Amino acid sequence: MPAADAPAVTTATSSTAPAATAPEGREPLPLAPAGPGQLVMTAPRRGKPPRHFSDLEPGERAEALAALGEKPFRARQLATQWFERLEDDTERMTDLPAASRQRIADALLPTLLTPLRTLSADRGTTVKTLWKLHDGALVESVLMRYPGRDGAAGRNTVCISSQAGCGMNCPFCATGQAGLTRNLSTAEIVEQVAGAARALARDEVAGGPGRVTNVVFMGMGEALANYKAAVAAVRRLTQPAPDGLGISARGVTMSTVGLVPAMDKFAAEGIPVTLALSLHAPDDELRDELVPVNKRWNVAQALDSAKRYFDATGRRVSIEYALIRDVNDQAWRADRLGKLLNARGRGWVHVNPIPLNPTPGSKWTASDPAVERAFVAALEARGIPTTVRDTRGSEIDGACGQLAAAPEEPRG
Ligand code: SF4
């Protein structure tokens, strides 16, 4: 993954758990997140989000339209409107019969994400959106625009959430500290990208009209813990229009803390997206602390699985490494990481050290720049391609691990 594609992990001190807000006519749901302070592998069961057109595989759509009394070919018309033209108002879908539009909207295009707040930074080219879901759960996504240089096309990357909260409990991460509320549905994941695609197409984001070129599953949640919905979302994002959003698989990065069985299953799906393994330490002793799931699948097992992913897909794996001052940023750890990676072959991996974004009051902070340079040099000395990622969006808490989905900005 290019260096600047995804934002950095940071600390949690002021995150606030999502508050339950009752949709009209419903009782408030008990949205206290499950399991802050502990590893939670299975999401709590909550009321399912309403079914949405984006949940459906192309083969399921004609049947869904037929159930509404529509001709099967309407499925392709609707897909063209939704995924290709990015139209979200059925009244403007003039190829659909006027009498059918509201019925189709009600049955297949429910509003899944309602924007509660939008914050922008970097002169409007980084935009974080806080979304309210149907049951009041909150998630965030971040759109980051990178202008092209020397005639090259720019990139528009959307960092999306796959769960409301996260059960992985990484101690330096705002999302992890808030615990896991629930899994997102396929459509709730896809619609974060579709929303960004619409905003870009309609010239609503600084930098002129554009399209989404990259998607990173680095917002709230451990995507592979919500395997079925996350993989279906990847398919929907990468299916050529009009079946899906037509984003190149090469532009999509699936991120994981190292759920080894799910990584191996994902490798067998045959979707050539980039896999990013959040390692953060090369030794089990420290990684047990920084990434608690390491006690289930350790460094060697996670790296072996990452290498199998490369072998199966040919896609170079990214190793994400948040550089935390005096915790994991020693050059000897970089050297050890380089050795571990080289022991599994050459040319299969790329390391992205990420300066930890400081959060006021936290004991965790970013490494000294000289220490960061020494860390990179130690990896490069082992021949490991290494790129320090920028911390785009940090000023609006839009970097990975900062997505705490607080209904009010934590910096009060
Ligand atoms: S760093 Fe990622 S996996 Fe860990 S708690 Fe945060 S969101 Fe979850």
Image: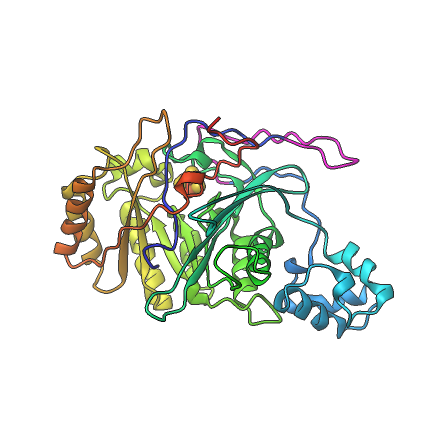
x, y percent for residue 234:
52, 60
The residues colored magenta run: 20-41
| Ligand 1, image quadrant it occupies | top left
x, y percent for residue 64:
75, 63
Magenta segment includes 40: yes
Q: How many marks?
A: 0
x, y percent for residue 248:
47, 68
Is residue 73 shown above or below 2? below
Q: Residue at horizontal 64%, vertical 42%?
A: 133
Q: Quadrant of the N terminus?
A: bottom left
The part of the image, by quadrant, that contains residue 83 is bottom right
The part of the image, by quadrant, that contains residue 106 is bottom right
The colour mode here is: rainbow
Would residue 101 appear left or right of 84 to someone viewing this image? right
x, y percent for residue 292:
36, 36
Q: Please, which residue is most extreme toward the bottom here?
A: 73
Q: Residue at horizontal 81%, vertical 73%?
A: 71
Q: Front-most of 148 and 305? A: 148
Would residue 314 appear left or right of 385 to someone viewing this image? right
Tell me, yes or no, if residue 39 can be seen here.
no
Q: Front-most of 59 and 172? A: 172
Magenta segment includes 60: no
Q: Residue at horizontal 22%, vertical 55%?
A: 341
Would residue 182 appear left or right of 327 to someone viewing this image? right
Is residue 406 shown above or below 268? above
